[in-house]
Image (cartoon, grey):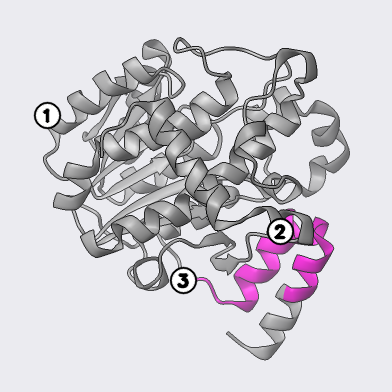
Amino acid sequence: MSVIADGVDAVLEWSVFGSFTRVGSALRRRLDHWAPLDGRRLEGRVVVLTGATSGLGREAALALARMGATVEIIARNALKAEATCAELRQQTGNPNVSFVVADTGDLTALRRAAADLLKRHPAIHVLIHNAGALDDVRQVSPQGLELTVASQVVGPFLLTGLLLPALKAGAPARVLWVSSGGMYSEPLSVDDLELPAAHYDGTTAYARAKRAQVTLVELWAHRLEADGIRVHAMHPGWADTPGVARSLPTFRRVVGPLLRTAADAADTLVWLAVDEGAPLLETGRFWLDRRPRPVHRFASTRRADTPPERERLWRWAVEKSGLVL
């Protein structure tokens, strides 16, 4: 990477707006000379992906299927999942696109889905945690957890643990989490993860869940490195997806022309899934536009990110998920 590219990148990061919009990805793509991904071949590799029936998850599934990967979608709606798989098979000519039904917030359903996947695939090479929504109304999971935390923290934590035998068999394997730049605004606080109904704010709940995701990525990375499993988080920038249109209509209206396309937002996710360079040489990193990024922008969040609090988060996730490690 050139000095000019590094300088432009630093200015974009400082501005936030320039970094997270399509401006950032367009400039970085040109200055960093991104290698195209569509020539990679993934026959024989199994990718498990949540949240793939729309938005950047669907774009990632499409790209990976085009490369020949066996793609398994975890989706909560069987009809929508079947339609998505049929479309992906038709668009790519790849017959190896299937699904299992589970809501990532329902731990019982995830256990069933994981058991099905382990029966189908002794080895899994990539696990992508992409499912997630920003909801204004507080909801509760079947196990009694606040749903944002259940579906974006506890559920993915459980699924990672349940699929470990196949991920170890598929090593070098990768576990990837789609986080959000919104996590920069919230410190790590286990006690504040589940917002009560009286003080519920969807944006805050979402940002706190994303902060927890990034911390768990670092913790998983440390534990799984010796097994040949690389764990990363990324954030896609600000993208024009159905989720943004539903949850943040005013934001979408204001920023609209500068929002990234879903395909653009999915680029780094797909790159992390297939590239044989940095994504395998490093682990536990947080990425945007194919570059690792700091996990803190403010001193307040850095101060809260202490070893005791990180250990509390791990123990909390083990307890809430019921995972036996």
The quadrant of the rendering that contains the C terminus is top left
Task: Name the chief secondary structure element in magenta.
Answer: helix
In the image: residue 114, left or right of residue 12: left
Q: CA distance from mark 2 to mark 1?
A: 44 Å
Residue positioned most to the bottom:
3
Q: Is residue 156 visible?
A: yes
User: Going by the image, does 289 lie left or right of 227?
Assistant: right
Residues in magenta?
A: 10-34
In which image quadrant can residue 2 be found?
A: bottom right
Q: Which residue is mark 2?
A: 303
In the figure, is residue 86 to the left or right of 30?
Answer: left
Q: Earlier in the sequence, mark 3 or mark 2?
A: 3
Farthest front residue in view:
308
N-terminal-most mark, 1 or 3:
3
Residue 238 visible in the snapshot: no
Asked if labels 1 and 2 touch by Cβ distance under 8 angstroms, the answer is no
Query: Of 94 and 243, which appears nearest the observer?
Result: 243
Given the image, on which type of amino acid does mark 3 rest?
Ala
| Magenta stretch encompasses residue 132 | no
**Dot 2 or dot 1, earlier in sequence:** 1
- In this rendered view, identify the residue nearer to me: 168 or 90: 168
Residue that numbered label 3 is attached to:
35
In which quadrant will I find the N terminus?
Answer: bottom right
The residue that disc 1 covers is 119
Front residue of 42/48: it is 48
Mark 3: give few (<14), some (14-19) or many (20+) Cα within 10 Å: few
Tell me residue 181's x, y (percent): 68, 50
Q: Give the amino acid at mark 1.
A: Lys
**Residue depth check, mark 3 versus mark 2: number of the one nearer the observer:** 2
